[in-house]
Amino acid sequence: MKNIGFLSFGHWNDSPHSGTRSASDALLQSIDLAVAAEEIGVDGAYFRVHHFARQLASPFPLLAAIGARTSRIEIGTGVIDMRYENPLYMVEDAGSADLISGGRLQLGISRGSPEQVIDGFRYFGHVPAEGTDHADMAREHTRVFLELLEGEGFAEPNPRPMFANPPGPLRLEPHSPGLRDRIWWGAGSRKTAEWTAEQGLNLMSSTLLTEDTGVPFHQLQAEQIQLFRDAWAAAGHERTPRVSVSRSIFPIVSDLDRAYFGRETRSQDQVGHLEGGLARFGKTYAGEPDQLVADLAADEAVAAADTVLMTIPNQLGVDYCAHVLDSVVRHVAPELGWR
């Protein structure tokens, strides 16, 4: 068995060729797709977060809305850029969304990725401390966020409060028990995966790694996953961690599928430069269902993960994206033993 989710970047574009023409479209269609995915039998609805872009940004109103419209599906992010976050306010937002959904939040967070503007986090009022950089700041925000999620009191209460306080220092509210164990780190390298394990975070690995050793992407990612699990065991954490990988998977079961993704049947890994270093990008999986089953069965990282997040072309509309998800659940997942 394997959890199957979708990952949406929430793009919108006012082009007449786009089915998602505005921010309102992107948000409302995201809710509708999560509802449809739950009905299909998909296990998770995940959303990318980008600032200063025509994509989904502040995720918690969207996650809370989906939580109120659904009852079973996991709701998450992939990922929130912690350079931009006030960790205290984030604890309150995350706790509220998790309680609304009945404890179904799965939050992916990370240092962030290349962005639309230079040092955009500075516009949000966040500046790295002297002697540190933006990556250090992201990890410091994460440290505070994780500590506060534990729910321990830390703030001195007013001796004459407007409303009666419980005894002792006060914590942020609302507190959602168990949310700390449902935080994931988006790791782009093997070294970062080991750090993720040491922090007691679940591992979220996407369709690119910010390093290249010459081996196929799926093998490099499988090595990353194994290093994560080895580091987790060495750290002595009591619970079993979760691991997700992202894949672009498009079963071709109709003429429309072929028109959209027929050319991707020849997709291969790619190597390029990202932020001054080599990066390896995973291929797109597109083809007839029997070919996809064979290809995915040979993917070592998919085999090692408990969760597969399928990137979806959200600008093709809710109906088409639901069709893609249904095709995977119906024609591919059973043959791979995911269902």
Image (cartoon, rainbow, N blue to C red):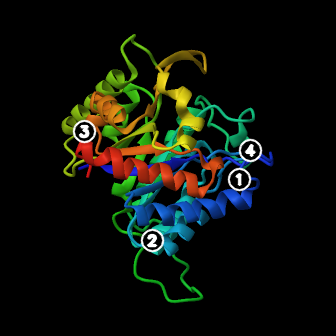
Q: Secondary structure at mark 4?
A: loop
Q: Earlier in the sequence, mark 4 or mark 3?
A: 4
Q: Tag 2: residue type?
A: Ser
Quarter residue 336 falls in: top left
Residue furthest to the front: 255
| Disc 2/disc 1 C-alpha distance (Å) | 26 Å
Q: Callout 2 environment at 10 Å: few (<14), some (14 to 19), or many (20+)?
A: many
Mark in the foreground, 2 or 3: 2
Per the image, the residue denoted by label 1 is 20
Q: Nearer the viewer, residue 302 or 156?
A: 302
Q: Tag 3: residue type?
A: Trp
- Give the residue displayed 54% in from the left and 63% down from the top: 63
Per the image, the residue denoted by label 2 is 101
Q: Secondary structure at mark 3?
A: helix
Mark in the foreground, 2 or 1: 1
| Disc 1/disc 4 C-alpha distance (Å) | 18 Å
State whether residue 273 is above or below residue 292. above
Q: Callout 3 environment at 10 Å: few (<14), some (14 to 19), or many (20+)?
A: many
Per the image, the residue denoted by label 3 is 232
Q: Which mark is residue 52?
A: 4
Q: Is residue 47 left or right of residue 239?
A: right
Q: Is residue 11 left or right of residue 252?
A: right
Q: Tag 1: residue type?
A: Thr
Q: Earlier in the sequence, mark 2 or mark 1?
A: 1
Mark in the foreground, 1 or 4: 1
